[in-house]
Image (cartoon, grey):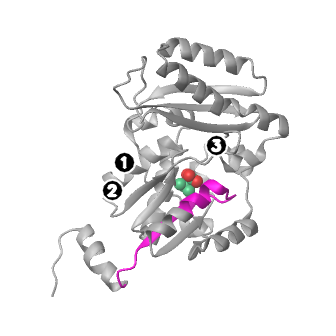
Amino acid sequence: MQVFHTGAEWQTNWLKSLQNGKTIGFVPTMGALHEGHLDLVKKSKKECDFTVVSIFVNPTQFNNPEDFAKYPTSLEPDLKKLEEEGTDFVFLPDTSTIYPEKPVLTLNFGELEYVLEGGFRPGHFNGVGIVVSKLFHIIKPDKAFFGQKDLQQVAVIKRLVRDLSFNLDLVIVPTRREIDGLAMSSRNLRLNPDERSQALILYSSLTKAKGELLAGKSWLDVHNQIIQDFNETPLAKLEYFELVHPEHFTQFETFDPLQKSSICVAAFLGSVRLIDNLPIIP
Ligand code: PAF
């Protein structure tokens, strides 16, 4: 008889040997898949024996009903792309599988709830935390793969894994960009041609700010200049452009080259909200 004392010991030493020691990589998505998602799948295939991808547009993480209603879906092309990547399993739950009833549990991620995405999208991280926890419980992956484009989501999920003792490794994959620099996002599909061309301001403002900070300009001056650039871009409406610690999301008033920092930006192009970020000091 074997005695074990921790969930990790059970899952790593025993459950896995019952599964013949094969490792499971998991890529949670909301579909409308692009190359950025496929990078996650490629990475999982490289690092794990089996790759499971979920496609589920999670209603509880949308604070804006219009954003949920208009979220792009493309199931057939998605399945084709996943097949071509050699994905082993696709999990396509319906809403009642994930939410047999409305959860009463709410998750609060402390400071992360009040800054940037947390502040502008109240309840968003609760929805992400709940669905990701459910997916982790269902799939029981060894590794889960997330994109760096959603930097604050990465911080939230790291916290979730630590606080709820999920026995898995998180693998964070760099942001995939279009040739002109726009970060790939399923929401880009909703941009009209004018919005698409003006959406470049997200990435160009990040690279401009990074260059100027590293050249010695103050954050205040850089920030003011970027606000002006957005004001001169008629289809763009800036929500935030902030210098933060990439894990705790403390907002910095000044730039310190000895301190880890990233710039995060969120802006509307017409009615489409996009986010992006760039490490300044990784
Ligand atoms: O990043 C996303 O696509 C979603 O937030 C996730 C992690 C799949 C949860 O619904």
Image coordinates of residue 225 in percent, x first then y, are: 61, 14
The quadrant of the rendered image in which ligand 1 is seen is bottom right
Image coordinates of residue 138 in percent, x first then y, are: 46, 70
Q: Nearer the viewer, residue 186 or 179?
A: 179
* Residue shown at the point (65%, 29%) measured from the top left: 204
Labels 2 and 1: the sequence-earlier one: 1
Residue 40: image quadrant is bottom right
| Distance between mark 2 and mark 1 Cα atoms | 8 Å
Horizontal side, residue 271 vs residue 146: left or right: right
> Would you say the residues marked 2 and 1 are in contact, meaning their CB atoms lie under 8 Å apart?
no
* Residue shown at the point (15%, 79%) measured from the top left: 3
Image coordinates of residue 84 in percent, x first then y, are: 67, 72
Horizontal side, residue 92 vs residue 195: left or right: left
The amino acid marked with disc number 1 is: Arg
The amino acid marked with disc number 2 is: Leu
Horizontal side, residue 92 vs residue 214: left or right: right
Q: What is the span of residues highlighted in magenta in the rendered image? A: 20-41
Residue at the disc numbered 2: 164
Q: What kind of element bears circle 1?
A: helix
Considering every residue shown, the one lying at the far front of the view is 215
Labels 1 and 3: the sequence-earlier one: 1
The local crowd at label 3, few if under 14, some if 14 to 19, many if 20 or more residues have their Cα within 10 Å, is: many
Residue at the disc numbered 1: 159
Q: Nearer the viewer, mark 2 or mark 1?
A: 1
Per the rendering, the mark at residue 183 is 3
